[in-house]
């Protein structure tokens, strides 16, 4: 959600090939303009993203502290 309150914020959501935002970045939503006080849903339960071990999802914005985000996940284990 854009918490800026007065102007749009450009946001990118990417999958990175290493933990903690390291490695190569592959955007799944790139430089999307989120209007003031609006939300952006990049994926939901019907558009699941399988994230490999030691990979990461990174959310960035063009304005410092302009975006708040929530990520939910399910751990799939073979044990």
Image (spheres, helix red, strand yellow):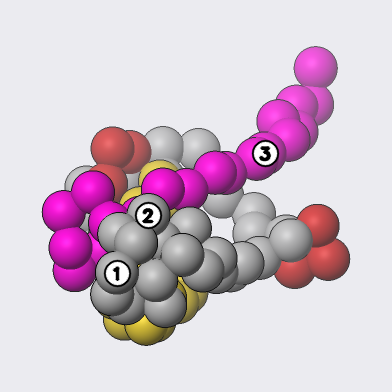
Q: Residue at point 46% right, 65% down? A: 37
* Disc 3 target residue: 73
Task: Work out whether residue 25 or residue 12 is closer to the camera in this orientation and state it.
Answer: 12
Residue 70 counted in the magenta span:
yes
Residue 3's tag is 2
Q: Residue at point 47% right, 48% down? A: 69
Look at the picture and state if 78 lies above or below 24: above
- Percent x, y for residue 48? 73, 60
Look at the picture and state if 77 lies above or below 9: above
Q: Determine the secondary structure under disc 1.
A: loop
Q: Nearer the viewer, mark 1 or mark 3?
A: 1
- Percent x, y for residue 9? 29, 72
* Disc 1 target residue: 6
Q: In which quarter of the image is residue 8?
A: bottom left
Q: Which of marks 3 and 2 is in front?
A: 2
- Percent x, y for residue 56? 40, 46
Residue 33's tag is none
Mark pair 1, 3: CA separation = 31 Å
| Mark 3 touches mark 2? (CB < 8 Å) | no
């Amino acid at each position: 959600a854009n918490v800026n309150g007065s102007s749009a914020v450009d946001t990118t959501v990417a999958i990175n090939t290493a933990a903690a935002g390291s490695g190569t970045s592959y955007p799944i939503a790139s430089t999307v303009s989120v209007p003031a006080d609006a939300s952006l849903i990049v994926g939901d339960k019907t558009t699941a993203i399988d994230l490999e071990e030691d990979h990461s999802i990174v959310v960035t914005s063009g304005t410092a502290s302009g975006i708040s985000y929530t990520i939910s996940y399910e751990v799939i284990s073979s044990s």
